[in-house]
Amino acid sequence: MTRPLIVLFTDFGLEGPYVGQMKAVLHREAPLAAVVDLFHDAPAHDPKPSAYLLAAYAEAFPDDAVFLCVVDPGVGSATRRPVAAQADGRWYVGPDNGLFAIVARRARTAHWWAIEAPPGRLSASFHGRDLFAPEAGRLARGEPPSGERLRGTTGPGDDWPDDLAQIVYIDHFGNAITGLRARSLRPGQNLAVNGVALASARTFADAPAGEPFWYENSNGLAEIAVNRGRAAEALGLAVGAPVSVSEAQET
């Protein structure tokens, strides 16, 4: 029998008690489940770039995985509802703030449910532990969502583009991941950031040392890098920085 798989995607960081407290709930609710830490440094308080990261990286996981996702600046507010979404078999549990909008849009099938608070104390500020983790454990055990089926799929993020021409993540090496799928770009197109044009390369070794370029990363996104350097520092990049697309100049 295959163990259930719960995947964590948060902006909590690894410092402090937050990830550990959620894992304690998951262990209580679904003790047989394997728990994978995918991102704990998703763009802080920013569901929009996080949505493009989640959509790209979720594809590598089994179709029955449960994603516990918390990028939730509206936690505790009356306007942000908690949801469970099922997209192509995978479950996504978290806030209905656009975080699952791109996942659902790219899926062949997507369905949504409300989440009901479990018995006991529900804090105003830590729904990751008190609301979303119990629901993720419930789904990992093979039980249905706790709340009612929601009709329709409209919601926050519906007006976001299919591909986001912005930096959505800076990794440990200073590489800058964009919200653009590489397949959405035509061969020979350049990217540009902060006035610097970037040609494409297949691998780091195809670019001279110290030269910035863009390439298709292992999850299909266009990523900006510097061979043996740090693109974020060299080009002054941060999450949210715009990226433009242009045709390569003939020489």
Image (tube, grey):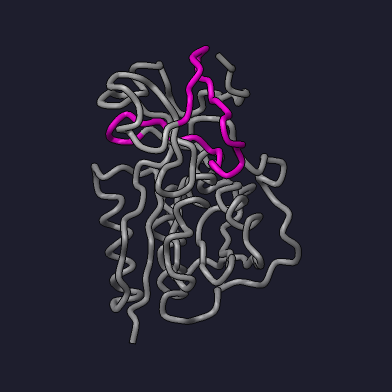
Residue at the extreme front: 251
Measuring 40% from the left and 48% from the top, which residue is drawn there? 218
Q: Give me the residue at 55% from left, 24% from top.
A: 242
| Magenta stretch: includes residue 219 | no
- In this view, the residue in front, 187 or 34, is 187
Residue 247 percent coordinates (x, y): 62, 24
Residue 28, quarter of the rendered image: bottom left
Depth check: 40 or 199 in front?
199
Side of 67 relative to 105 (left or right): left
In the displayed structure image, the side of residue 164 where residue 158 appears, left or right: right
Q: Nearer the viewer, residue 249 or 19?
A: 249
Q: Is residue 2 left or right of residue 144?
A: left
Query: Residue 199: x percent and y percent?
Result: 48, 25
Q: Residue at x 26, y 45 (%)?
A: 14
Residue at image location 29% in from the left, 57% down from the top: 21
The front one of 148 and 174 is 174
- The region drawn magenta spans 171-200
80 versus 197 height, above or below: below
**Farthest residue, direction bottom:** 1
Location of the N terminus by quadrant is: bottom left
Q: How many marks?
A: 0
In the rendered image, residue 195 lying in the magenta stretch gets the answer: yes
